[in-house]
Image (tube, helix red, strand yellow):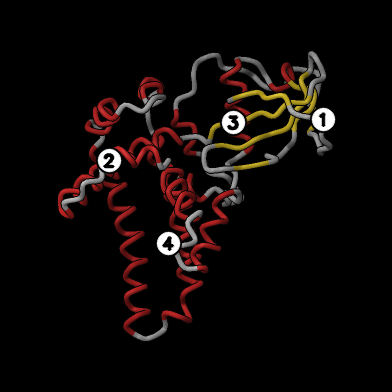
Amino acid sequence: MRLLSTPSLSFSPFLLPTNRSRSISRHRYSVRCATFINNDGGDSFTAKSGYLFELSAIEADSLSEYNISKIAAIYFRKPIVVARRLFQTGFAFGKWFGLRYLDNRFDRSDDMFEVRAAELKKILVELGPAYIKIAQAISSRADLIPPSYLNELSLLQDRISPFSTEIAFNMIEQELGLSLVEIFSEISPEPVAAASLGQVYQARLRRTGQVVAVKVQRPGVQAAISLDILILRFMAGLVRRAGKLNTDLQVMLPLAM
């Protein structure tokens, strides 16, 4: 979570009461807290991939930097989670490619092109930040993908559904060790921007009156990205050896994210 100064912009604030309205627990959050699902159903990543977040606080801290040995050590002890993720991604993409095959077989590819593009975007959002980052990189290459897919994938640049504001506010309190009413006099009730890695709230500091942007990392993002990188690195190694490629796909993979 980060506080950034921002120009004084107009927004609809949530006025916080002056009394302490929340009880604060001083211990660090486990990533497990993120398994609560946004009631509006908008956070499909949490809804579909929330099982990835069940890490202890110590395990979550060890994923704060990119270290493939540490990542492998953690998930070596969680074979069921790894197997479930492999099944989830394999089934999602396998079903999509199967439908594309049937479209070609029954000469309906043109009619279903935009539908399949929208379905692919939905799959990427449900799988989470690692796949969204790859899609964002691909969507900037109009020479590589058809227009319908380009249009859908480009929506992932800045139209990601936010996660629960209640969870975000709890994370702010837990990380700073203070209640919202002690930190801010006003805060926007909903994020003013949302992306694959986090979302932003606009607030006014109680002590100075300065308007700031509060950036909150999406819950479980480190757990999801680390496991997906581990899996994709393994797959990239297989592709490199099978195709006898000179390019080191395993090194390029984290750079694309």
Callout 3: few (<14), some (14-19), or many (20+) C-alpha neighbours within 10 Å? many
Q: In the image, what residue occupies the spot 46% across and 80% down?
A: 110
From the image, tell me which residue sits under label 2: 250
Choose the circle earlier in sequence order: 1 or 3.
Answer: 1
Callout 1: few (<14), some (14-19), or many (20+) C-alpha neighbours within 10 Å? few
From the image, tell me which residue sits under label 4: 144
Q: Closer to the camera: disc 4 or disc 2? A: 4
x%, y% of residue 168?
60, 32
Q: Label 1: state its secondary structure.
A: loop
Choose the circle earlier in sequence order: 4 or 3.
Answer: 4
The answer to whether residue 219 is above or below residue 100 is above
Q: Label 3: state its secondary structure.
A: strand
Q: In the image, what residue occupies the spot 28% across and 25% down?
A: 70
Q: In the image, what residue occupies the spot 41% across and 79% down?
A: 109
Residue 216 numbered mark, or none: 3
Q: Label 2: state its secondary structure.
A: helix
